[in-house]
Image: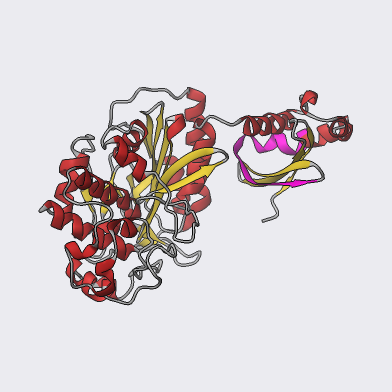
Amino acid sequence: MKSISVRRVALFCVFFTAAAPSHAQARTLSPEQITRIDAAAAEWLQETGAPSVSIAVVTDATLAYTHAYGLAQLMPPRPATVTARYAIDSISKEFVAAAVLILAEQRRLSLDDKVARWFPDLGEASNLTLRELLTHTSGLRDYWPQDFVTEEMTHPTTTAAILREWVRRPLDFAPGTDWQYSNTGFVLAGAIVEKASGEPLMRFLTEQIFAPLRMSRVTEDDTAPLGESDASPYTRYGLATIRPAPKEAAGWLFAAAGLAMQPGDLALWDISLIRRSLLQPDSYRTQFEPVVLKDGTRKDYALGLDVEQVNGRLRIGHGGAGSGYLSDHRIWPDDKVAIVVLTNSDWTSPSDLLEQIAYVVVPRSPVEARADTVFSGFQSGSVDRSLFTQGGNFFLTPQVLADLKASLAPLGPARLIELLRESRRGGMITRRWRILCGGHRLEAIERGYPDGKLEQFMVSAASD
């Protein structure tokens, strides 16, 4: 297939869009929010050169918006649509973990069962528990740490072959003493789901999860490439032209990374996590509980899920990476918000776009809202002086405000104002903010007192 220049792809990405929603939607986003999301996505495509990106946004635990941008296929050009499926790769792990919890509810297994119950001849691995497999604390060596398709993965394999070749290897550490990402552990967990349920993994997932949640277009991405109506995978080597990405041979993805779906279907899964509508209450408590190592160290990972506290908010989700595809989805359960971003490129960061969409739809904390107010005031050449101390107001002279307006207003509205870190100095709280405006990357150093008054909010070009 003829390669496509990055510039040409960027132009295609801007002008070819599709937005026909595939699920009934309660439109809870304002026209202004939709305009800002669409602008952020178009800008992200231009900056990254990704062929396409497809998103879904959940607000108030309801699918509020789906939209696809760019090209699902480069040659011949085929616009992306919201019904096109993308590989979600490691996001698949969430569904395998949920399958184990469902089997536990059915009393067909427990998380603390040892692997030996189903596979007694796997050496050290037979003494591992399902919980250790699902939390990446097993010590099983990952069979795919590389960011490319290895020579071995160009040849078909089987689950039995992965168990024989990788699971029987010596453990990298004593179970429960460390955290190390392991696709191998989830292949073994998927094999146990098949043993305990008496069904192929995909059939069990469909019957127990996808059908009840009406996730109608989920497919497996393990045995063959996706269909002609789906997104084709692309890669880049360095900054060179974009090329079709190689497909992993059959059998390698399975329970570790074997699913593909449209963003709207993944959003339905996110809604079920917000509403806790599929599993029993105890299962959700277990699913969201961060793992604690034997030395008491807490990790921001539970059962197939990242579980984080971000600026005082619970945020859960997972990313996915495979040949020609990247994906991310994050859920703010307390705010009833979720965002899905899928792309058919493997050199970009869907998380960057996800953060920009979150800036539009996730309710802001008081500290975040104040930073927004100050920055937009600088762009307009005025400021709410009640937010600042006497020293801060001394610094913000008419000349300073005029310079801030002249330099910041042309950049357009902020696409993202994100708190990077917080520390203390001189009796003040210091916060460093990342600010994106158009194609410009800025930073702000805020210093303020515990009573909320600001001593400074200094904006400059980003230093890293």
| Furthest residue in direction front, as rendered | 295
Above or below: residue 416 compared with residue 131 = above
Q: Position of residue 139 (x, y in %)?
A: 37, 68
> From the viewer's perspective, is residue 261 above or below residue 27?
below
- The x and y percentages for residue 293 are 44, 59
**Membership of 13 in magenta stretch:** no
Closer to the camera, 115 or 361? Answer: 115
Q: Point out residue 93 in the picture as x, y percentages from the top left corner.
A: 31, 53
Q: Closer to the camera, 380 or 222?
A: 222
The residue range painted magenta reads 405-425
Q: Is residue 33 above or below residue 127?
A: above
For the C terminus, give its image quadrant: bottom right
380 and 106: which is toward the camera:
106
Residue at (39, 73) in percent of width and height? 172
Colouring of the image: secondary structure
* Res. 3 visible in picture: no
Q: Which image quarter: residue 222?
A: bottom left
Whether residue 89 appears in this view of the structure is: yes
Q: Residue at x 23, y 63 (%)?
A: 115
On the picture, is 296 further left or further right than 433?
Answer: left
The answer to which image quadrant residue 190 occupies is: bottom left
Q: Is residue 110 left or right of residue 298?
A: left
- Left or right of 137 on screen, residue 438: right
Residue found farthest to the left? 198
Which residue is at a point 23% across and 38% down the rendered structure image? 215
**Quick check: is 412 in the magenta stretch?**
yes
Q: Position of residue 89 (x, y in %)?
A: 32, 55
**Total count of labels:** 0
270 relative to 314 in the view: left or right: left
In the picture, the quarter occupied by the N terminus is bottom left
Q: Quadrant of residue 177?
A: bottom left
